[in-house]
Amino acid sequence: MEEERMTQKTVVLQHLKRFGSIEPLTALREYGIYRLGARVADLRSEGYNIITETKASVSRITGRPVHFANYKLVGNGSV
């Protein structure tokens, strides 16, 4: 019997449902997902209500300001 493989979209949705939000670095480190924005766009096209917040921080390496997206699942997720 073939083992069922979870898609990146399913992994992102489960993370959002469990934790409420996800950032690109978390997606990369935890799940190996490089194109988080594309997976979020896929979920939005299926009717999930996901908002994007821009966060600011300072790079630990360069000391310069950096900005990144934080995606949040709103309500029960669907429109």
Image (spheres, rainbow, N blue to C red):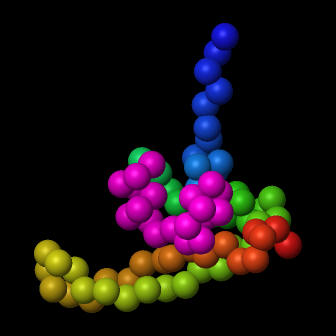
Give the residue displayed 64% in from the left and 15% down from the top. 2
Residue 55 percent location from the top left of the image: 43, 86
Which residues make up the magenta segment?
Answer: 13-31
Q: Main secondary structure of the magenta part?
A: helix
Q: Quadrant of the C terminus?
A: bottom right
| For residue 7, above or below residue 79 | above
Query: Is 35 displayed left or right of 76 in the figure?
Result: left
**Relative to the observer, which residue lies in front, 49 or 20?**
20
Residue 14 percent location from the top left of the image: 63, 54
| For residue 79, above or below residue 28 | below
Residue 1 visible somewhere in the drawing: yes
State the residue lying farthest toward the right: 79
> Would you say residue 12 sits in the magenta stretch?
no
Q: How many marks?
A: 0
Residue 39 visible somewhere in the drawing: no
Quadrant in which residue 26 is drawn: bottom left
| For residue 26, above or below residue 7 | below
Quadrant in which residue 71 is drawn: bottom right
Give the residue displayed 61% in from the left and 38% down from the top. 6
> Would you say residue 23 sits in the magenta stretch?
yes
Query: Is 75 displayed left or right of 37 in the figure?
Result: right
Give the residue displayed 45% in from the left and 58% down from the top. 27
Residue 24 percent location from the top left of the image: 44, 65
Q: Quadrant of the N terminus?
A: top right
